[in-house]
Amino acid sequence: ELALSQPAKEHTVFVASSRYIAPGLVFTNGRSSETSYAKMKVSVPPVHSPGQIEWPRGAPDIRRHFVTTGANRIGGDADFYGAVNARLRRLPAAQKNVVVFVHGYNNSFQEALYRFVQINHDFNMNSVGVYYAWPSAGKLRGYVSDRDSAYFARDGLRKLLLGLQRTGAKRIYLVGHSLGTWISMEALGQLSDIGRPTLGGKLDGVILLSPDIDPAVFSKQRECMTRLPRRFIVFVAQD
């Protein structure tokens, strides 16, 4: 009960999404040819355990659960990157970094948003968080649909990374999970095709978490990349 007396910690996440947005700022699993933008605020409860997401089972309680405390749509490219820049300007020089998170297969918008906030919180990243939300079907039997959506979403990620290069970010880190690692590798290959494999040196690291990529396919993707970022890390489980 002592932890409940401590305040919840609020995190701000910028969202770039190729999901279709329904009225009321509802990110659906439909595909959109236009990238949409938003700014979300999520609070992490004082009783949070590292690695966990404290989901509400009934009415959300900010002292015990992850809670979305703010959601605002951002109009377009200029407004989005302007908002990211404004956030960067408020950070000390050593923290003017952007972390881009690309979620995996079978993830709803909310699930991946909370997972990114949990990672940010547990690792105390002290950076600007950007969540790339691609149109996963969000269901266990939706793998084929998710594979198609991954192809659909890779151009949007490339566009996002190029836009972030033009911001005041000192360093950019790309974190992909599951099928999001395939999207990340495809986008990196596209950046190599146009002569920007490391975003002018700003792309300081790539982290692939539990990659859903066939090893032979990964090798071919790697061959298409003219240069790797300085840090390139792959996390896999022993099982």
Image: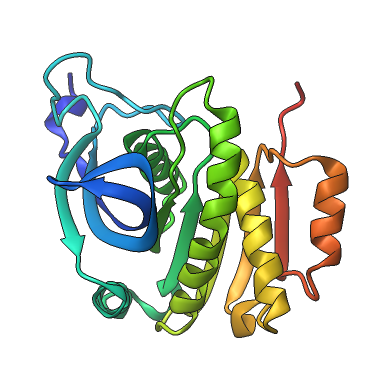
Rendered location of residue 9, percent (x, y): 23, 44
Q: Is residue 52 left or right of residue 224?
A: left
Between 193 and 165, the one lying in front of the other is: 193
Exactly how many numbered labels are in the figure?
0
Q: Is residue 124 above or below residue 33?
A: above
Task: Tell me the quarter of the picture where residue 46 sits.
Answer: top left
Q: Is residue 14 left or right of residue 124?
A: left
Q: Is residue 196 above or below residue 55?
A: below
Which residue is depicted at the point 45% across and 75% down? 164
Rendered location of residue 94, percent (x, y): 45, 75
Which residue is depicted at the point 17% across and 18% down? 1
Task: Tell me the quarter of the picture where residue 205 sits.
Answer: bottom right
Please say whether residue 177 is visible from this viewpoint: no
Please say whether residue 235 is visible from this viewpoint: yes
The extreme top residue here reads 57
Query: The C terminus is located in which quarter?
Result: top right
Rendered location of residue 65, percent (x, y): 23, 27
Between 165 and 21, the one lying in front of the other is: 21
Which residue is depicted at the point 77% across and 25% down? 238
Q: Is residue 195 above or below residue 54?
A: below
Between 15 and 91, the one lying in front of the other is: 15
Rendered location of residue 224, percent (x, y): 81, 67
Which residue is depicted at the point 43% across and 29% down? 138
Q: Is residue 188 above or below residue 142?
A: below
Between 101 and 35, the one lying in front of the other is: 35
